[in-house]
Image (spheres, rainbow, N blue to C red):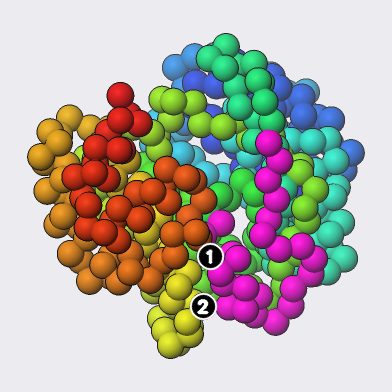
Amino acid sequence: NQMKTPGISFVIPVYNMERYLPRVIQCLKAQTMPGFEAIFVNDGSRDNSLAICKSAASEDPRFRIIDQPNKGVAKARNAALDAARGKYVCFLDPDDWVESDMAQVLYEAAKKENADIVMFGIYNDYCDKNGNCVKTLIDGPALCGVYRGKPFQEYFDALASSYLVITKMLRRACIEAAHLRFPERTLGEDGLFYVAFMRQNPSCLVAIQKPLYHYTVARSASLSNSWHPERLQDNFYLSDAVWSVVEDWGLQDSEMHRKKACYCTVRDLQLGIKNVCSGPLSAKERTAWLQKTVKLPRVENAIKNTAVKSVHSRNDRIKLLLLKLHQYRAVIWLSSQRHR
């Protein structure tokens, strides 16, 4: 039976998530707007995840299952995008969950304004090792309201580094027109996808402060806190993508666009420092990596042109100040303390 086009396709990559799936299935069944589809991509789970998804799909025709061998989150999301039929796409991770009015609030806002992208607030749920939520902080988009014309160019400083795809609903026609898919990387693939979407210069952005998504904040074993040897050679692909958008748009001479791209480069550098300090290298090797890295012209330029106060965490502000003073051993020492 060919149901009418769903308003929203929820994309849910699943890998060994039996513990969380009942919750995410429940929050989708509770949606106040019935016109959606949820595509669960079982990415070679070795637990009971597939059976749980199949059971949900047998009870609810809006739930669809794709079963594939383990290929990672990027390929799982891409398989769902290939199969999606909705006017809009939302990315939902199976260890997270959403408010029951999420689909309705987002779809009504998008329809009313004919939006290409809707950004919204999230609850950051900090959990202990048993999965119990111990505190929640609310985070919202940097903007609020309806923006038309070239919002991504105009508000580049507010939007360019908002890499999380789970905080956005995207028009699927915009994704398909540019053949956008997630690149296969273990880290930052959603940021690259978002930057590629932004590059298309979507002409209507709606930003809603209301938090609708519950994000389970990274456990200590999460990817961004673990060792990635490949980053030693290739650490700046996200900020490089941001720089190339600025160049694409011919805005290299705009101070605001350059400043923001510099900020993104410094953010990549801070991630690289965290990475190098969480791996097996000696303090001497870590410092040598940093000294070599800061000599890259784009990195040197970014350190010089990024204000210490523009960086969010206190620890990263201290490190940026030390970088400006060329105190590389101190930066490595400080970062290594955090990783012990």
Please tell me whether mark 1 sits on a helix, a strand or a loop. Answer: loop
* Circle 2 SS class: helix
Tell me the quarter of the picture where residue 39 sits: top right
Alpha carbons under labels 1 and 2: distance apart: 11 Å
Q: Earlier in the sequence, mark 1 or mark 2?
A: 1
Point out residue 322 in the picture as x, y percentages from the top left corner. Answer: 30, 53
What is the three-letter code of the residue carrying label 1? Ala
Please name the residue shown 44% across and 17% down the image: 46
For the residue carrying disc 2, how many other residues have a C-alpha within 10 Å: few (<14), some (14-19), or many (20+)? Answer: some
Check the image and report above or below for 94 versus 176: above
Residue 276, located in which quarter of the rendered image?
Answer: top left
Taking the magenta stretch, the answer to whether it contains residue 35 is: no
Between 182 and 218, the residue placed more toward the observer is 218
> On screen, 256 above or below 187?
below
Name the residue that disc number 1 marks: 160
- Circle 2 is placed at which residue position? 256
Q: Nearer the viewer, mark 1 or mark 2?
A: 2
Image coords of residue 329 (percent x, y): 19, 45
Does residue 142 belong to the magenta stretch?
yes
Q: Which residues are magenta?
A: 137-162
Q: Residues within 10 Å of mark 1 (few under 14, many from 20)?
A: many
Name the residue located 14 percent from the left edge and 57 percent from the top edge. 292
Residue 259 vs residue 210, the one in the foreground:
259
Using the rendered image of the protein, determine whether residue 225 is visible from the camera's viewpoint.
yes
Task: Count numbered badges in the picture.
Answer: 2
The residue that appears at 79% across and 69% down in the rendered structure is 146
Q: What kind of residue is marked 2?
A: Met
Residue 162 at what x, y percent from top left?
A: 56, 56
Q: Nearer the viewer, residue 113 or 270?
A: 270
- In the rendered image, the quadrant that contains the N terminus is top right
Q: Is residue 292 left or right of residue 305?
A: left
Across and down, in percent, residue 328 comes to 21, 50
